[in-house]
Image: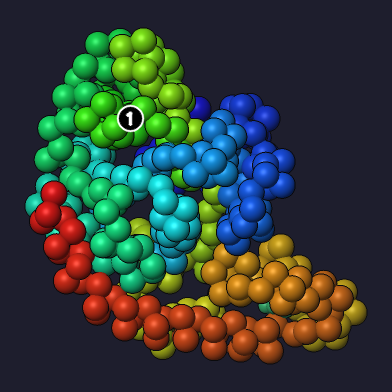
Amino acid sequence: MIDPWSSAILNYEKLIREFGIRPFQDLLVNLEDPPLLMRRGIIFGHRDYGKIIKAIREKNSFAVVTGMMPSGKMHIGHKLIVDQLVWYQEKGADIYIPIADMESYSARGIDFEESRKLAIEEYITNYIALGMDPKNKNLHIYLQSKNKIVSDLAYKLARKVNLNEMKAIYGFNGSTNIAHHYVPLIQVADILHPQLKEFEGPEPTVVPVGPDQDPHIRLTRDISERFQKKYGFITPSSTYHRFITGLTGKKMSSSNPKTAIFLSDSPEVALKKLKSAKTGGRDSLEEQKRLGGVPDDCVVYEMLLYHLLESDVELKKTYQNCLEGNIMCGECKNKATVMIKNFFIALGQKRKSSKKSAKKLLNHD
Ligand code: SF4
């Protein structure tokens, strides 16, 4: 069982084997210009993504839904979702971003006003600073607690879901609060509501998530089939991305600041943090020259892979040089820290100018 509210590290291969998630790599040949995250296997799995590829190729409408749960500061690992949204926006998708203030309240006890503030000042500001176009007419950002269409739909869908099913999917028990039981239904409605007639649906919909969110996807897909006749839902697709490793080698988490580079960090702090990150280097220079480093076990390399190095050729060179012991960690880290500093200088400037648009975007809804 996968718990979407825990921060456990998941075994990706096992997910593919046991939960029916398909390898994404097999689809790459069908995409004209796959973005970095797809090319490099960071998006590793999918359900039914063929429908989305078809919509992209035939220039038909499709929707992307991905929520944000305001529960703390955003770290650089959260950038993965924004990178995907930016790409989908370029492809002409209808983008829906529910702000999961109801989930934040039921799972973390964060009240609605605080969620709203966090969503504007932290999440939406960063999304815009990272490249999301706030003026795109196909962008819809809303607070779950304020969206009557979503809450009405959730209530209607709940008619065909029972407690035993929720227990089996989420491991809920007798002491789970009722709000927590209900909130997954809101998420199902978040994902399915773009397919309602009011939104000119149905249309293929994809939900890019971390694999820990797969229980919501499975529930949504099942429910969409139960209501297929009534609403004409097209069963939603999903993609799954790997999580970035934290600076210490554990999962990067906002609640464990030692593991994370926050998007609101200054360039100097980001640089310092990356400098102290765990590498796949050997105990001595002599050993590293002789045996080579282990890039697959290196946080610095991962940062290049996920975020800092655009060029696949350069990345491959770094990987090879590391493996063959041609490059030492000090030199490699220095290059990466210059890149991260520049990235954070640019991001900091964009964050300043994004705050106003972030406010407007949410107040508009
Ligand atoms: Fe990591 Fe670079 Fe050291 Fe290789 S040389 S282990 S990629 S820091």
Which residue sits furthest right? Answer: 290
Number of numbered discs present?
1
Residue 270: where, in percent of width, then height? 44, 80
Looking at the picture, does residue 355 appear above or below residue 362? below
> Residue 147 vs residue 5: left or right?
left
Residue 113: where, in percent of width, then height? 9, 52
Looking at the picture, does residue 318 appear above or below residue 216? below
Residue at (64% x, 34% y) in the render: 22
Residue at (16% x, 24% y) in the render: 152
Q: Quadrant of residue 184?
A: top left
Q: Is residue 38 visible?
A: yes
Residue at (19% x, 20% y) in the render: 155
Q: Which kind of residue does numbered mark 1 sit on?
A: Gly
Looking at the picture, does residue 186 appear above or below residue 97? above
Give the crowd class for mark 1: few <14, some 14-19, many >=20 residues within 10 Å: many
> Residue 175 vs residue 77: left or right?
left
Residue at (41% x, 55% y) in the render: 89
Q: What residue is shown with label 1? A: 201
- At numbered mark 1, what does the secondary structure look like: helix, strand or loop? loop
Instruction: Check mark 1 vs ligand 1: CB closer than 8 Å? yes or no.
Output: no
Q: Nearer the viewer, residue 38 or 29?
A: 29
Q: Nearer the viewer, residue 31 or 149?
A: 31
Q: Nearer the viewer, residue 160 or 323?
A: 160
Q: Is residue 176 visible?
A: no
